[in-house]
Image: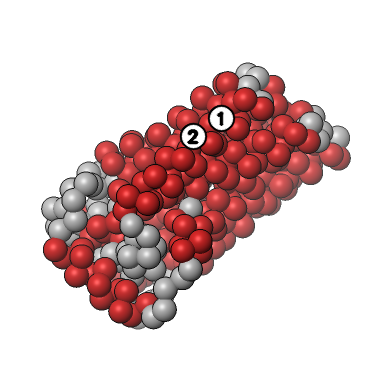
Amino acid sequence: MTQTPVAPAHAGHGEESAAPRAGRAALVHRGGPGRSRLAAYVALTKPRIIELLLVTTLPTMILAAGGLPTWWVVVATMVGGTLAAGSANALNCYVDRDIDALMRRTGHRPLARAEVSPTGALRFGLVLGVVAVLSVGLVTNWLAGGLTATAIGFYVVVYTMLLKRRTSQNIVWGGAAGCMPVLIGWSAVTGSLAWAPVLLFGVVFFWTPPHFWALAIRYREDYANAGVPMLPVVAGPVRVARDITGYAWLTVLTSLALWPVATSWVYGVLALGAGIGLIASAHRLLSRTRRQVDDPSVEVNPMQLFHLSNSYLAFVFVAVAVDVFVR
């Protein structure tokens, strides 16, 4: 199988090359009037990503408590989780400001449009992180607080700084940071960990590659131009679709493993139904990709799987909460 070479990312994390600066200038010109300073800082936190992280946290807390947890534990965990995710995302924007300016998908971000200074973004991200860890640790317990700090550090250091620009498996291992909210939510309620949150961690872990690779197929040229070796950049389309399908199966099988461990038939039926939909969509993507090799006019439409995967994850975690209340 032939692979498409990836141009190296010459700009380091601390310095910006002339090319990214030129790209930023072009994007600022195209972007029209800038946002307010407050809106720009909010945008650094990537609010739409945070929403999905919180959807996985609350149902896990409900499962841990066997019902509604104490309200102040819920508030502290959800607010702390929001701040932690915002911190990680802001620091990610700071580190990736050179390549964000080169990509259509990320060219609207505040640093790419020079709406916020790099120093301001760095300080903002660090302050959010400190407040997040303290709020979770002091109000709930320090296992949850430590896991919060681990999630921020893993996303920024392991994924953004070490893996993203070096390996096509970046999102596989780096995606573990996005799985941490389930461990944080469970430990905030119980002060410990168990097999149930580990399995929910696994659901998000295996779900992340097909979710993100579907998006990366759509923006393959963006990542190639920025020198980021996402799998769709360095591997053939059939290989990518095959890997997506494999991870979709692992996601569903892991979700069903929770059934005998911590839930009833209510969750099992709902998770199975959602899983069939996710697997069917992945196989559809694989089938269309294979056909496209022989007939370029065939439309693959990877964003269909991307949007479905968002709904799948939310549905499975809502099913966890529904199962608790039904029981």
Could you tell me if the residues under marks 2 and 1 are in contact, i.e. CB atoms within 8 Å? yes
The three-letter code of the residue at mark 1 reads: Leu
On the rendered image, what quadrant is the N terminus found in?
Answer: bottom left
Q: Using residue 82 as the reference point, say whether residue 98 is left or right of it.
A: left
226 w.r.t. 131: above or below: below
Q: Which mark is on residue 321?
A: none
192 w.r.t. 179: above or below: above
**Front-lying residue, 305 or 141:** 141
Residue wearing tag 2: 130
Q: Quadrant of residue 186?
A: top right
Q: Using residue 227 as the reference point, say whether residue 111 is left or right of it.
A: right
Residue wearing tag 1: 134
Where residue 286 sits in the image (x, y, percent)? Answer: 42, 60
Where residue 90 sits in the image (x, y, percent)? Answer: 42, 50
Q: Using residue 198 as the reference point, say whether residue 150 is left or right of it.
A: left
Q: Quadrant of residue 20?
A: bottom left
Q: Is residue 136 visible?
A: yes
Q: Is residue 242 visible?
A: no
